[in-house]
């Protein structure tokens, strides 16, 4: 199993995910046989790790639903080990959670993805605050980057940008900690995702100076990734250079920006053009990134919805904010109470401004879900909120995820 795992990691590091799949599947099959035949915990832990790696490959190959199944099995194995008293399981479970969140985000299960990512991030924050905190700092920064990507696809873009900014700031302030990490490729790709999210959101909010700063860091990181991981990662470099060029043009430097774009196309034309198709049209980019809670609440206020002033503090669109995930919107002890106030504003907004109302309602639902996942009591209003949300969005991947939460509440006997 060790040899199969090492070979798969080498292929992934070189950017050859598809070629590594057969070896990982073989390792998983062998791991299941060993777990069935022997009771030693090491076999279960090896299987959990192989399943975690398998999910990464499946996500890259566009097979996110299979990745979800692998991650559920991996998490169950780690939790079994944790229950048996095996040490060191908390960060491993957090890693599974955030990768599970990424898979769900790719499937369109938006609110579940945001909840899982938030829980993973909270676990790493607790670890960093603990007695051996410094050794977990690189992983916290990596998870902040993954959280930013998940939020940019499935949640509040302002939180996504804040999470990305914090990841990059923390990385730049703690470069020495990354000099000794054995997984440089994984960390660099996560940080590149952070820079990409920060650059895109800042540019869409007309903060081009901040966007260009993030772009410049991305180019440096991508150069390091190619040097460390090989030409299989040139996509990242071409995309970073192209994004930098597009934002230079938007910032009034057309000559310098056009030169950057030519450079990007010389590195990898397809990757450069793919990135340019996303970032060059800033109005379309604003729409693509979606509504933030802050924008939605301001629209609700314009519509005359009562109670907006009481929940405005739950949102922020200021760069540099410390609020990087939904659980940080307020004090944990008041989360259910504040979520109800936000949800009532959302439901009242739906008739006049449906898109904004949905954003507000979803953010309230996420706050309720986080309270529930941590064992807290939530009011019966949560079910009412989900009924209104499902009626508003219909049954697709997005609405289906909300229906799953509604059914989970009913199976538990309703909110308490």
Image: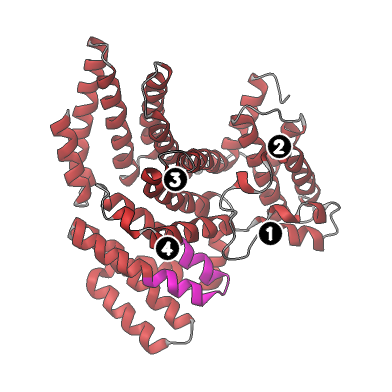
Query: Is 181 left, or right, of 128 in this rendering?
Result: left
What span is in magenta?
195-216
| Local secondary structure at mark 4 | helix
Q: Is residue 208 magenta?
A: yes
For the image, the number of numbered tags is 4
Gap between marks 2 and 4, in whole Å?
Answer: 34 Å
Q: In percent of the image, x 32 and y 41: which residue is there?
A: 56
In the rendered image, which residue does mark 1 sit on?
Answer: 294
Single out the mark in the foreground, 2 or 3: 2
Please tell me whether the stretch drawn in magenta is mainly helix, strand or loop.
helix
Residue 386 is left or right of residue 263, and the answer is right
| Residue 301 vs residue 354, the one in the foreground | 301
Q: In this picture, is 153 found above or below 205?
A: above
Residue farthest to the bottom, as pictured: 255
Identify the secondary structure beneath mark 3.
helix
Q: Earlier in the sequence, mark 2 or mark 3?
A: 3
Q: Which residue is mark 3?
A: 106
Colour scheme: secondary structure
Residue 36 position, x and y percent, is: 26, 12
Q: Residue at x 27, y 55 (%)?
A: 179
Mark 4 vs mark 1: which is more N-terminal? 4
Nearer to the camera, 243 or 224: 224
């Amino acid at each position: 199993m060790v040899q199969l795992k090492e070979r798969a990691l080498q292929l992934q590091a070189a950017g050859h995910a598809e070629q590594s799949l057969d070896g990982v599947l073989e390792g998983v099959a062998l791991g299941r046989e060993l777990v069935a035949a022997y009771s030693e915990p090491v076999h279960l832990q090896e299987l959990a790790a192989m399943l975690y790696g398998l999910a990464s490959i499946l996500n890259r190959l566009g097979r996110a639903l299979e990745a979800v199944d692998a991650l559920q099995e991996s998490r169950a194995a780690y939790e079994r080990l944790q229950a048996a008293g095996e040490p060191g399981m908390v960060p491993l479970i957090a890693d599974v959670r955030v990768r599970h969140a990424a898979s769900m985000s790719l499937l369109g299960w938006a609110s579940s993805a945001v909840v899982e990512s938030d829980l993973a991030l909270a676990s790493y924050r607790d670890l960093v605050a603990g007695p051996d905190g410094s050794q977990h700092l690189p992983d916290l920064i990596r998870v902040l980057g993954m959280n930013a990507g998940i939020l940019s696809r499935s949640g509040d873009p302002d939180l996504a940008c804040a999470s990305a900014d914090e990841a990059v700031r923390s990385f730049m302030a703690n470069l020495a900690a990354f000099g000794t990490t054995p997984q440089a490729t994984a960390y660099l790709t996560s940080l590149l995702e952070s820079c990409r999210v920060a650059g895109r959101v800042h540019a869409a909010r007309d903060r081009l100076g901040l966007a260009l700063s993030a772009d410049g860091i991305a180019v440096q990181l991508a150069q390091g990734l190619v040097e460390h991981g090989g030409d299989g990662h040139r996509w990242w470099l071409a995309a970073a250079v192209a994004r930098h060029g597009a934002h230079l043009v938007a910032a009034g430097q057309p000559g310098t920006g056009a030169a950057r774009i030519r450079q990007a196309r010389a590195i990898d034309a397809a990757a450069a053009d793919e990135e340019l198709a996303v970032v060059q049209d800033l109005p379309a980019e604003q729409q693509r990134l979606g509504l933030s809670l802050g924008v939605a609440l301001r629209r609700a206020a314009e519509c005359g919805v009562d109670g907006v002033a009481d929940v405005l503090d739950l949102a922020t669109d200021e760069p540099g904010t410390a609020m990087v995930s939904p659980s940080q919107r307020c004090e944990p002890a008041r989360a259910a109470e504040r979520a109800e106030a936000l949800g009532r504003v959302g439901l009242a907004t739906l008739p006049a401004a449906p898109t904004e109302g949905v954003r507000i309602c979803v953010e309230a639902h996420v706050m309720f879900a986080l309270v529930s996942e941590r064992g807290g009591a939530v009011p019966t209003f949560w079910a009412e909120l989900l009924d209104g949300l499902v009626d508003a969005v219909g049954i697709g991947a997005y609405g289906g995820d909300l229906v799953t939460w509604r059914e989970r509440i009913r199976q538990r006997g309703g909110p308490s």
